């Protein structure tokens, strides 16, 4: 199955539909070709409409080969050009309005990814409306073509209005050029807005990465604090165990000293001559045990 179509394929399909008495649309061209994406068909169908007036002018020039008077043929060609120019003006104005609406929607986009996705859906809806507006313009061209057939029955009146028709044709041509310039400006503005939105998205992503790095650094700092706390607890535990061991040794030494003092008192008491027994001076170990008990 083919994966792409060319501009020539779309133009030939549009000509075939016109030959069958049908108006060329995106769905009819896709059905006629049996393939093609809507975006591609839309782009090439627009070029077909843009070149239609040139082809019609070329076809109108063939009127000179018939028997109608030259003035009548010229007036018919001029009115045909006016009608085609007006149709393009309507299509260009609809395109400009759609681009303006798209620009207004683009200006309200935020840096949130969810909102960006939502705006993309809104853009798709705007694009659908744009296609609908173009289809309306195409139907307007068909109505103008029917009107041209009626104008053919009033060529005598057109001869009297020859000068006025020339003036109106020039005015409509100027309007068409202005509308085309406005459409180009709107397209450039939409591209600029899309670039700005992409830059905003990249900036938000950079800020998110910075926040992640800051969180990692904070986690590392907390981990270091926890390690320091564990080491301090370990040192306190060791110091407490050492103090308890010192207290135990001091307690043993105090008990031994008291035992020796009691023995000495007993020996002195058994002697015949009574003497004043002085209380032994506390040793450093005994003082340490007493201080520890007071605490």
Image (spheres, rainbow, N blue to C red):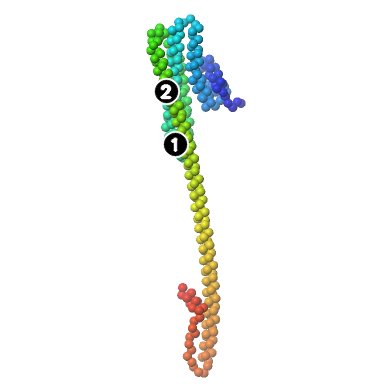
Residue 197, percent across and down?
47, 36
- The answer to which image quadrant residue 164 occupies is top left
Residue 149, percent across and down?
45, 11
Residue 31 seen in the figure: no
Residue 226 vs residue 189, the one in the foreground: 189
User: What secondary structure is found at the residue carrying circle 2?
Assistant: helix
Residue 57, percent across and down?
48, 14
- The answer to which image quadrant residue 171 occupies is top left
- The answer to which image quadrant residue 85 occupies is top left
Residue 79 vs residue 125, the one in the foreground: 79
Residue 189 seen in the figure: yes
Q: Distance between the Cα atoms at labels 2 and 1?
A: 29 Å
| Residue farthest to the right, as pictured | 1
The residue at which mark 1 appears reads as 109
Q: Is the residue marked by circle 1 packed among few (<14), some (14-19), or many (20+) residues within 10 Å?
A: some
The residue at which mark 2 appears reads as 178
N-terminal label among 2 and 1: 1
Vertical comparison of 216 with 293: above or below? above
| Residue farthest to the top, as pictured | 67
In the rendered image, the quadrant that contains the N terminus is top right
Q: Is the residue marked by circle 2 packed among few (<14), some (14-19), or many (20+) residues within 10 Å?
A: some
Query: What's the residue at 53%, 17% (across, down)?
Result: 15
User: What secondary structure is found at the residue carrying circle 1?
Assistant: loop
């Amino acid at each position: 199955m083919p994966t792409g179509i060319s501009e020539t394929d779309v133009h030939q399909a549009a000509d075939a539909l016109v030959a069958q008495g049908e108006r060329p649309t995106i769905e009819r061209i896709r059905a006629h070709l049996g393939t093609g994406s809507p975006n591609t068909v839309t782009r090439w169908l627009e070029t077909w409409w843009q070149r239609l007036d040139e082809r019609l002018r070329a076809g109108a020039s063939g009127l000179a080969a018939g028997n109608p008077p030259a003035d009548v043929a010229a007036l018919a060609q001029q009115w045909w050009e006016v009608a085609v120019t007006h149709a393009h003006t309507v299509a260009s104005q609809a395109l400009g309005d759609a681009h303006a609406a798209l620009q207004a929607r683009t200006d309200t986009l935020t840096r949130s990814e969810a909102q960006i996705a939502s705006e993309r859906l809104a853009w798709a809806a705007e694009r659908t409306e744009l296609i609908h507006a173009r289809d309306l313009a195409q139907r307007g061209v068909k109505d103008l073509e029917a009107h041209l057939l009626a104008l053919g029955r009033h060529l005598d009146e057109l001869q009297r209005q020859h000068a006025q028709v020339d003036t109106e044709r020039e005015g409509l041509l100027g309007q068409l050029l202005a509308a085309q310039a406005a459409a180009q400006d709107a397209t450039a503005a939409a591209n600029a807005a899309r670039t700005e939105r992409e830059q905003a998205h990249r900036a938000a992503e950079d800020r998110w990465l910075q926040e992640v790095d800051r969180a990692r650094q904070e986690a590392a700092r907390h981990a270091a604090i926890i390690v320091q706390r564990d080491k301090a607890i370990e040192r306190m535990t060791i110091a407490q165990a050492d103090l308890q061991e010192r207290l135990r040794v001091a307690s043993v030494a105090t008990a031994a000293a008291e035992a020796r003092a009691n023995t000495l008192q007993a020996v002195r008491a058994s002697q015949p001559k009574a003497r004043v027994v002085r209380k032994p001076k506390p040793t450093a170990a005994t003082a340490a045990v007493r201080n520890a008990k007071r605490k």
